[in-house]
Image (cartoon, rainbow, N blue to C red):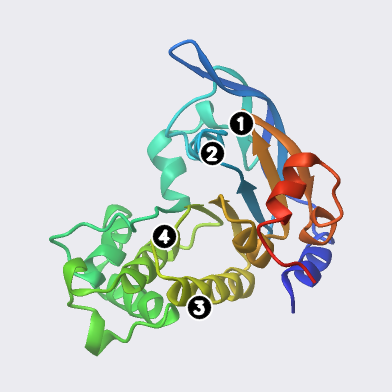
Amino acid sequence: MSMIEFSKSMQVDQQIIVEFSDVGYLIGGNQILADLNLRILKGEILVLLGESGCGKTTTLKLINRLIEPTSGTVLVEGRSTIDWDAIELRRRIGYVLQEAGLFPHFSAAENVALVLGLENWDEGRKRERTTKMLELVGLSIPKFAERFPHELSGGQQQRVGVARALAADPGILLLDEPFGALDAITRTNLQKEFAKLVRDLGKTAVFVTHDLHEAMLLGSRIALMDKGRIILLETPENFVKSELPLARLYLETISVS
């Protein structure tokens, strides 16, 4: 099933998981986001596309309350983020960074089990879940469980990061250019594996990138951002038909059949 076909099937379930209503964010007098309105549906991969400084990562951080809006409201599961306990909210949301963000003195297995420990899972249950998550992302326990981050390739580190984000079975995944630092072949392989994984597990994902090829491959919808605003929100199928000048500039960077 292509991501476009997945998008069509996903539209059957219109449950809104995250909603931005007239959201603004200022820092030091600078308007980072302005009048942001967006609904993210259960089971979709929503890609935030744009150049550095357009507000993509800021939008992502508002979802798990790493920052709070200076105006408007961000709802997660129908509840304002400022009404959530911040720690409880973040434990319900998986978060994957570009450099994986692994703890260097923890093994791969210990990194994956970290959130489970915070949730007070017993040792047997933690071990079983950690094993399942590492195997899910293609890392065998005998070979990789006891390796430390410096003993892993960049792609392997990112797999551990994804496994950790999935460990506590969150409904929402936030990914901030997680494959941006990888070589082209590793990146392409992980992109395809990630899309299948999220689809198979029924997760909702918000994915930040500046790469249209990646957005087209992964996204059920693409939100094109510019200067703190969403200027286009479309499926990949309709994105390629857009006459918006910035969209056309992005389309010139790839070959679209």
C-beta proximity under 8 Å, tags 2 and 4 = no
Q: For mark 1, what is the residue?
A: 74
The residue shown at (36%, 77%) is 134
The residue shown at (86%, 45%) is 243
Which one is in front in this view, the residue at disc 3 or the one at disc 4? Answer: 3
In the displayed structure image, the side of residue 99 where residue 205 appears, left or right: right
Q: Residue type at mark 2: give it.
A: Ile
In the displayed structure image, the side of residue 113 where residue 249 appears, left or right: right
The residue shown at (70%, 45%) is 223
Q: For mark 2, what is the residue?
A: 63
Mark drawn on residue 35: none
Which one is in front in this view, the residue at disc 3 or the one at disc 1? Answer: 3
The answer, for residue 132, to whether it is visible in the render is yes
Q: Residue type at mark 3: give it.
A: Asn
Q: For mark 3, what is the residue?
A: 189
Q: CA distance from mark 1 to mark 2?
A: 7 Å
Q: Residue type at mark 1: give it.
A: Val
Q: Is residue 211 above or below residue 38?
A: below
Q: For mark 4, what is the residue?
A: 165
Query: Element under label 3?
Result: helix
Q: CA distance from mark 2 to mark 3?
A: 28 Å
Q: Position of residue 54 (x, y in %)?
A: 57, 34
- Going from N to C along the chain, the mark reached first, 3 or 1, is 1
Tell me if mark 3 has few (under 14), some (14-19) or many (20+) residues whose alpha carbon lies within 10 angstroms of its own. few
- Going from N to C along the chain, the mark reached first, 3 or 4, is 4
C-beta proximity under 8 Å, tags 1 and 2 = yes
Query: Element under label 4?
Result: helix
Q: CA distance from mark 3 to mark 4?
A: 19 Å
Residue 256 figure quarter: bottom right
Q: Is residue 143 above or below residue 178?
A: below
Tell me if mark 1 has few (under 14), some (14-19) or many (20+) residues whose alpha carbon lies within 10 angstroms of its own. many
